Image (cartoon, rainbow, N blue to C red):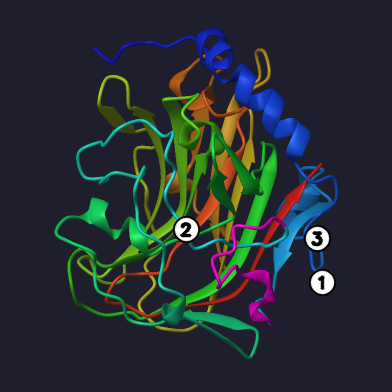
Amino acid sequence: MIPRVTRRKLLKLATPALLLLKIIRPAKAWTHGTTFPVPTVAAANGLNRQAFFDHFNSSATIDLSGTGNPGYNWYLNNAWPNAPGPFDGWGDVRSAPATPASNITVANSIITTKNAGRNGPGSGSTAGHFLQTAQAAGASYVGRGFVPPMFIQYSMAVVAGSGDSLAWTALWLQPLEFLTGSAPVWTEVDCMEYYLGNPGQVLMSVHYNDFSNQITVTLNNNNAVTNVVDSNFHTYGMLWLPAAGAINGIVQFYLDGVHQTGADYSYASGSQGSFSDMLHMMMTITPGDIQNASWDYIGVWQQ
């Protein structure tokens, strides 16, 4: 049986970090002057505020020099010294190396990640090839995290086909409170994952992670959605509405505007899926080791 951790206990753990995070969280949306129509799904759920947007028309939104200064959309330094210790398959995020700036190019409103070999055997060691919306700064952070409800929409293209079975491209969310060490139990949302080891298949997943007890569980039953068998740009979306009292929370996924019902996840207050409802979810791009991927834009809409 998986140990139950109450939401009250988790929030008690996270409270000091939450207070600090709220103090330093920027008040205005980081759009860098870019406007974009509110996506249909976002508007239908009252999420009309563009909280984040990057069209990748300039490298100025990426901390390519590794300054660690606030004001960037993306950071390459992936070490989080106060995170829980290593978990099998993850590697050690406390000392993960930064993504090499030479692996990033920006042109024609597209960010393209060049081929990059893994830092060592096993999927956990690929942590050195991430772009993330926040970076550790001591026990705190610089950058952005997002609390549900929210809708993420992005356009990207993978290199379809076979290849290294551990190579993947992904956009996923994990809480800043986990990385600062105050919330070892949390819900992870993988907006999309494309593994070369399973050509054409896109995964859209919700996971429960308990680093204190070395437990990880996939919560949505059928997370394999419509295949992507070409290398064209496709539009992806993820809607996250938190649980509220007797109203269940939901995580829904979209591909080219089509609701991928097989990947839906519904959860009740106090359940495993609700552990991240009040936490600050950081977006992470996994460029794809030994694989190219291009990103046209990524946006977040909230209330």
Neighbourhood count class around disc 1 (C-alpha, 10 Å): few under 14, some 14–19, many 20 upward: few
The residue singled out by tag 2 in the image is 77
Pick whichever, 149 or 181, lies toward us.
Answer: 181
Rendered location of residue 245, percent (x, y): 67, 13
| Disc assigned to residue 38 | 3
Measure the alpha-carbon separation of dots 2 and 1. Answer: 25 Å
Rendered location of residue 101, percent (x, y): 46, 76
Report the span colored magenta: 58-70
- The secondary element bearing badge 1 is classed as loop
| Disc assigned to residue 24 | none
- Closer to the camera: disc 2 or disc 3? 2
- Residue 65 highlighted magenta (yes or no): yes
Check whether the beta carbons of the residues at disc 2 and disc 3 lie within 8 A of each other. no
User: Sequence order check: which comes first, mark 2 or mark 1?
Assistant: 1
The residue singled out by tag 1 in the image is 34
- The secondary element bearing badge 3 is classed as loop
- Closer to the camera: disc 1 or disc 3? 1
Pick whichever, 34 or 138, lies toward us.
Answer: 138
Q: Is residue 291 left or right of residue 100?
A: left
Give above or below for 277 relative to 289.
above
